[in-house]
Amino acid sequence: MWLLAELADQFQEHPDFQLDGGDLWVLMLCQVFFSLLTFPYFAFWIWMLIHCYRTEPDRQFWIWILIIAQPIGPIAYFFLRYIPSKEFPTPAFLRRWTRGRELMRKEIAAQQIGNAHQFVQWGDALREVGMLDQARQAYDSALAKDAVNLPALWGAAQVAVSQKRFEDVRSLTQRVLEKDPQYKFGDVSLAYGRALNELGDFPAARTHLERHVRRWRHPEGVYMLAKLCADQGDTDAARQHLQAMLQDIHASPIAIARKFGRWKSRARQLLRKLPK
């Protein structure tokens, strides 16, 4: 737009001012170029504002920075607040390349020593680099040697989660919980509840999650329970669970509250949809 304003000034100061065809093409191309630069920046600015509003505990300060400090504010927020709040995983192919020798060493140990422990270590390494089929085989080998090996059962369950084999997730996590209900500080219990929910066994999922949230206040678990209550028409229970979850997040340290920004946002959306 500033090009058009400059052109208008030229016409006012010099009534006989004229542009030939080449100048008009240059003017049009420049205007298109700066318009393309302006729109991505505007979209980036809106993106940072939305993220700040949804997840930033000190949102009032940062919203003022985003609005007033143009164009430095959005860029500073992106590097100082947005990136540290995200956990960007290393690509699987890069992990396989950097951990190649470790994978080979653990495979040799599993084949030579042959205990369940070595197969679990090999399976864990394979799972971490995204080699899920091979990891599943390693965990199966460990369970063939020790059918109640908790790390092997949990590792196999995590592979099943990644492969969306929820029937296997339910079976494997149930075996873990039967031996140690507190294994992995509620992560196994949460995975079991998630599997029940994915399989459509909603009454069992609600019953399990009601027990789960009394011991572990995972925001995902509380949200799943609230969603089940809402879907079953128990809006009062759903509202109580969501409000309690938001209070838990607000009472958490800032770093932890920022990690749960997604569930905080989803809880607020579901609260708005609940009947009054």
Image: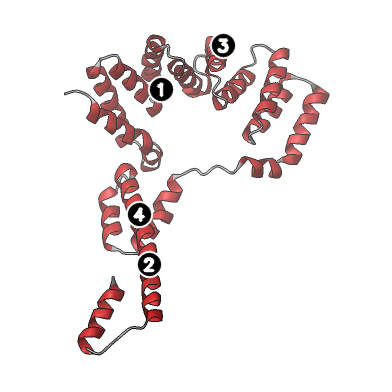
Identify which amino acid the numbered label 2 is placed on: Val
Which mark is first along the chain, 4 or 3?
4
Marks 2 and 3 sit apart, C-alpha to C-alpha, by: 63 Å
Mark 1 against mark 4, which lies toward the viewer? 4
> What residue did someone put label 1 on?
216
In the rendered image, residue 103, in percent from the top left (x then y), is placed at 73, 35
**Dot 1 crowding, Cα within 10 Å, few <14, some 14–19, many 20+:** some
> What residue did someone put label 2 on?
32
Quadrant where the N terminus sits is: bottom left
> Residues at badges 1 and 4 in contact (C-beta under 8 Å)?
no
> Residues at badges 2 and 3 in contact (C-beta under 8 Å)?
no
Q: Is residue 104 visible?
A: yes
Identify which amino acid the numbered label 1 is placed on: Trp
Any mark on residue 175, and which? 3
Which residue is rendered at x = 38% and y = 25% of the image?
Answer: 217
Which mark is first along the chain, 1 or 3?
3
Marks 1 and 4 sit apart, C-alpha to C-alpha, by: 39 Å
Marks 2 and 4 sit apart, C-alpha to C-alpha, by: 17 Å
> What residue did someone put label 4 on?
43
Which mark is first along the chain, 4 or 2?
2
